[in-house]
Image (spheres, grey):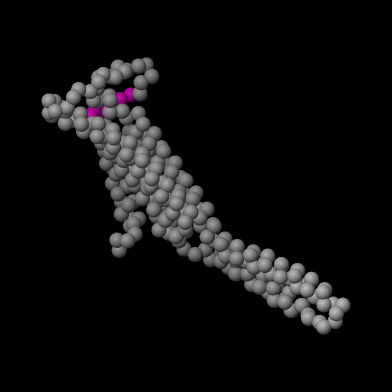
Amino acid sequence: MYRNLDSDKVIGTLEKLDLRIGERFPDSGLHQVCRELTEIGRSSAANAQRISRPNILIRLVVILIILAGVGSLIYIASILRFTQTPSEFFGFFQGMEAAMNTVVIVTAFLYSLTKIEEKWKRHRTLKALHELRSVIHVIDMHQLTKDPSSVVSVSRRTPNSPERDLTEFELMRYLDYCSEMLSLTSKLAVFYAQSMNDLVVNSAVNEIESLATNLSRKIWQKIMILHRFENQESNPTRFGNFPVID
């Protein structure tokens, strides 16, 4: 019961996060990203379930081709005749060599057919994981200009400085929402790892989790700066002053 991620619970968490961001930052781009991520979460859960199910059409086609291949091998074996005539002795072995080469090629081809469904599932899964990887970078772009220095120090704006109109509390909440979205995006990737036990897929999922964790770590460094500034305001003798930056 608790050995796999419950897709309904993860999507429910995303929906709740979407409502929270909408209440705090209703007109923000982050709210739109979270709404899009929620839709991706629903489709990811359904897509992972579809991928985990056997593809009957592919299996039927593969079975028919394998039967045809086995039939051709039986036919080749049936036309081989061993004779004791010396003049035909070497010709027999030449034909046997050609037949064995044919058998090896056909066998390799039939074995590759058994991997078609697995390759098809892997292709669909990697395509979906690429979408999640792109979403992670979109989330990172939204927190990129959320600089805590605008709150913790006296800053001098330039004509091209980004708009920083969030209060200390709002900035902390914004960054925390970004961190939650990164974590939930990596959990959506786990849906696919649960649907198929494939080394390539598992490696891609691990890369997405590592990417989300590394970006979330940058966000929490900003949050810690804000927490330190908050503690400095409550106890100014314990912490040093922050520098003035341009």
The answer to whether 47 appears left or right of 240 in the picture is right
Where is the N terminus found, in terms of image quarters?
Answer: bottom left
Residue at the location (45% across, 51% down)?
203
Main secondary-structure element of the magenta-colored stretch: loop
72, 53: nearer the viewer:
72
Image spot of residue 190 (x, y percent)? 39, 53
Give the magenta part as a residue range. Answer: 163-170
Residue at the location (17% across, 27% down)?
239
38, 48: nearer the viewer:
48
- Is 64 placed above or below 38 here? below
- Is 161 placed above or below 73 here? above
The answer to whether 20 appears left or right of 102 in the picture is left
1, 208: nearer the viewer:
208
- Is 139 placed above or below 42 here? above
Residue 214 lies within the magenta run: no
Image spot of residue 12 (x, y percent)? 31, 51
Image spot of residue 8 (x, y percent)? 33, 55
Residue 46 in view here: no
